[in-house]
Amino acid sequence: MAAVYNFKILTPNAKAFDAEVSSIVAPGELGYLGVLANHAPLITTLKRGRLTIRFDDGREELHQISGGILKVANNVAILLTESIEAADE
């Protein structure tokens, strides 16, 4: 059983996502970056690209984001983005 942390995605119009996850992979400005539980504190900008969310049970969700800001601290990750939609496989 992998360690989990809380991950929220906020857009100007709604809370698009709020769940416990085992990892995310996000499109950073300098390349894709992964976040696991107990990650060091981080604030970074994101570019347009694919966001991968992995759950403790092995499920995976793929989304397309328009870029944004990712903050990670104390086993909570918050992504602020203008838009998010399901990605085609």
Image: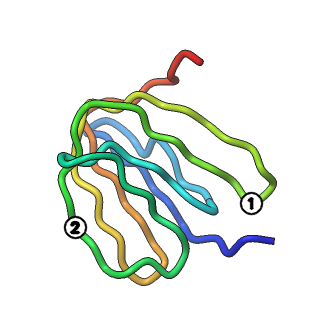
Where residue 57 appears, x then y in whole percent?
81, 55
Looking at the figure, which quarter contains the C terminus? top right
Where residue 43 appears, x then y in whole percent?
22, 67
- The residue singled out by tag 2 in the image is 43
Q: Which residue type does callout 1 highlight?
A: Asp
Q: Which residue type does callout 2 highlight?
A: Ile
Residue drawn at (38%, 40%), measured in percent from left and top?
Answer: 14
Residue drawn at (50%, 22%), measured in percent from left and top?
Answer: 87
Regarding residue 20, the answer to whether it shows in the image is: no
Q: Secondary structure at mark 2?
A: strand
Q: Residues within 10 Å of mark 1 (few under 14, many from 20)?
A: some
Between residue 31 and residue 89, name the one nearer to us: 31
Q: Sequence-wise, which precedes: disc 2 or disc 1?
A: 2
Regarding residue 28, the answer to whether it shows in the image is: yes
Residue drawn at (44%, 58%), measured in percent from left and top?
Answer: 34
Between residue 68 and residue 11, name the one nearer to us: 68
Q: Is residue 34 left or right of residue 6?
A: left
| Residue 30 sits above or below residue 47 on the image | below
Q: Is residue 58 left or right of residue 51?
A: right
Where residue 49 appears, x then y in whole percent?
33, 31
Q: Residues within 10 Å of mark 2 (few under 14, many from 20)?
A: few
Q: Is residue 36 left or right of residue 56?
A: left
Residue drawn at (69%, 54%), measured in percent from left and top?
Answer: 55
| Residue 47 sits above or below residue 71 on the image | above
- The residue singled out by tag 1 in the image is 56
Residue 31 is marked as none
Where residue 5 appears, x then y in whole percent?
57, 71
Looking at the figure, which quarter contains the N terminus? bottom right
Between residue 32 and residue 87, name the one nearer to us: 32
C-alpha distance separating marks 2 and 1? 24 Å
For the residues labelled 2 and 1, say whether their Cβ atoms are less than 8 Å apart: no
